[in-house]
Image (cartoon, rainbow, N blue to C red):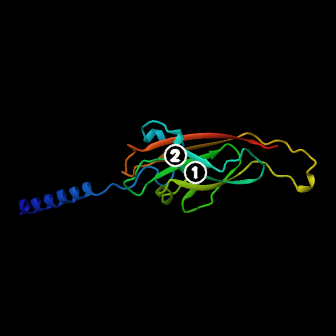
Amino acid sequence: MLKKMLLPCTLAATVAMGATLQAPPPAHGFANSAPSFQCMSCHPGPMQPEMIKLSNLPDSYRPGQTYTFTLKLDSTLESLGEQQGGFAIQASSGTMIIEDRTHTQIVDGILTHTLEGSHRRSWSFSWQAPGESGPWWQFWRRPEPGPDVSITVMAVAANGDYSAIGDEIGAAGVTLKSDR
């Protein structure tokens, strides 16, 4: 009796394992965010800084003013799945502001994409410059200049195959000076 039950159970277990092994892999890695600037530790390949397009950057910033930027990944890499890309951006001073909670979030002080945000290659967000803008009636007083601010971004254009192989990585940095 034991031999008769062993064969069907073994066959059922083998079929179940085979079905599990054939199922598409789940999204993994940091499709839900990039909480650090360690993209290259998982995504091998040459760095492509020209892929990063950060628009609406001012020539200099005014203390306390808020600026809205757009980050776009300029890549011809086609995605085979939902994941298109991701990013991490940080400013050395000032405050990053989420404008689109569906596609961006802040994790450990780094502005990054959400899971839904990994389905695109363009994101908008804001940054409030450090310092305070003085009251209009103190126009005669020259305020102290704000610090130089470094904005650092690292991003991945994903090929959507649920692996880190074949993705494109880019990094860029810019320094903004106070206009005062």
Position of 116 relative to 35 (above/below): below
Q: Which is closer to the viewer, label 1 or label 2?
A: 1
Q: x, y (%) of residue 74? A: 51, 47
> In this orientation, which residue lies closer to the viewer: 164 or 36?
164
**Of 121 and 83, which appears nearest the observer?**
121
> Which residue corresponds to the image point at 62% horizontal and 46% vertical from the top-left?
90
In the rendered image, residue 16, in percent from the top left (x then y), is placed at 21, 60
Query: Which three-letter amino acid code belongs to the residue tagged 1?
Result: Leu
Sequence-wise first label, 1 or 2: 1
* Residue bearing mark 2: 155
The amino acid type found where label 2 is placed reads Ala
Location of mark 1 (residue) = 71
Q: Position of residue 61 (x, y in %)?
A: 75, 46
| Residue 161 shown left or right of residue 105 in the figure | left
Q: Looking at the image, do the residues carrying marks 1 and 2 touch, with CB atoms under 8 Å apart? A: yes
Q: Is residue 152 left or right of residue 51?
A: right
- Return the mark for residue 101: none
